[in-house]
Amino acid sequence: MEKSLNFASKPINRPMEFSFGNIFNKTYWKETIIPFAKKHWVLIVAILTALSLAHTIWYFTIDHPLSEIADKFKSTFTEKKGAAFKRNSFSYKIGYVVGAILKSKSFIFSLSGTTILIAEFNYQFLFKNLFVDEGRKGKFFYFLVLVFLYFFIFTILLSLFGLKAEPLGLHTFITNTWIGFSVIYSVIQYVSDSHKRLREMAIQKTKVELSALKAQINPHFLFNVLNNLYGTAIVEDSPKTAEGIQQLSSIMRHVVEGTKNERISAEKEVQFLYDFVELNKMRIPKRDNIRININIDWDEQPTQIAPLLVIPYIENAFKYGISITQESFIDLNFKIKDQKLNFSCRNSIIKQFDKLEVGTSTGIENTQRRLALNYPHKHSLRISNENNIFEVSLEVNLK
């Protein structure tokens, strides 16, 4: 009797198409509008600001020129007299200028939009690159750039508004608003991003620990078994087998300990890489069509590094890059000098049936995420996959 199998297909989530009927649909806003706005908010603010600026410029150059407002401002305060006015002259001036500005209806939107855009530019291109990444020297140059920008913006605005509008003090007000808000915005955004990154690192660490716990039988039991096998291999005069067992034991211990710490010494990581590579080489037959070139170097200066950082790339090379019958190769360089890591790996890509092992790219994706979390703005990663050659180049500032 034949059995019929019914497979329930999962619905595919696609963005809802625009229609006027969806404007009042909460699901449409939640799944389409809000994600789009979050992703492209800078572009949206820039477009709205440009439209608002066009109206503001028209208003203060054609409809109500700043020179006329400034003349009225002078005549009004020249005519006013009395002790009460003198005591509150500053308040009167502020009230007059604010009133004149509010009449344009678009000035506040123009000022708000340009302030937000300048603050975001300052955070993305100046604050993070100089103040955060470059140490004391970067902080000094950041404040130097801010001072230069302040006087540059001040001068430009003064020339745009004209000397007649100088008594209104708009150039001073706008410059102070732009620069002051940019600094405050950058500090708040950096603190927010730092907390977010710490939470993500904690989540990543928890996931790694859970994965390790799922994958491992009692590690102490395995270490004891490996030690017994190592002793047996020595007694039976099998030095190559004994060396392989010792390297496997060292690798397992390093993996177990590595999941518990965010940083480990470079010495331990280098020894682990050497054992990992040698153990992989042991299972590869010595043939003329296989070329493996490994260079692992360390300047022996005390350095801390995130554990297992480049292992997925090395593992990927041995999984995808070695063939029993075809021409295949692995060129690997790992070097730590002056607290900087330089790593490169090139390997052939074997797509036919005779590659030694099949794997996935999940480990590589996780490594990219770990780099972003552990070394934000301190690493450079380049990956290419062309002409059946996979190549990765990584530079990390370990300081």
Image (cartoon, grey):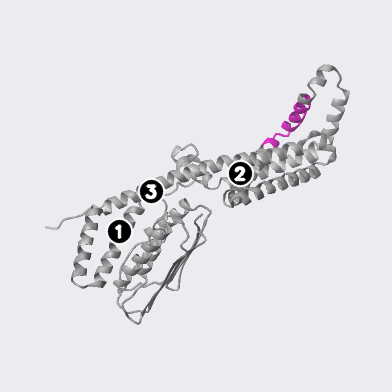
**Residue reaching furthest left?**
1
In the rendering, which numbered label is found on residue 45? 2
Instruction: Confirm whether residue 281 shows in the render.
Output: yes
In the rendering, which numbered label is found on residue 356? none
Let me know if residue 107 is in the magenta part. yes
Label 2 and label 3: CA atoms lie apart by 37 Å
The quarter holding residue 55 reads: top right
> Which residue position holds label 3?
205
Q: What is the crowding at mark 3: few (fewer than 14 residues within 10 Å), some, or many (at least 20)?
A: some
| Mark 1 element type | helix
Q: Residue at x 30, y 74 (%)?
A: 284
Q: Magenta part of the protein: which range?
A: 92-108
Q: Amino acid at mark 3?
A: Lys
Is 148 left, or right, of 307 in this rendering? right
**Residue reaching furthest top?**
83
Label 3 and label 1: CA atoms lie apart by 18 Å
Label 1 and label 2: CA atoms lie apart by 52 Å
First in sequence: mark 3 vs mark 1: 3
> Which residue position holds label 1?
252
| Mark 2 element type | helix
Q: Position of residue 91 (x, y in %)?
A: 76, 24
Q: Residue at x 43, y 46 (%)?
A: 200
Q: Main secondary structure of the magenta part?
A: helix
Instruction: Confirm whether residue 47 shows in the render.
Output: no
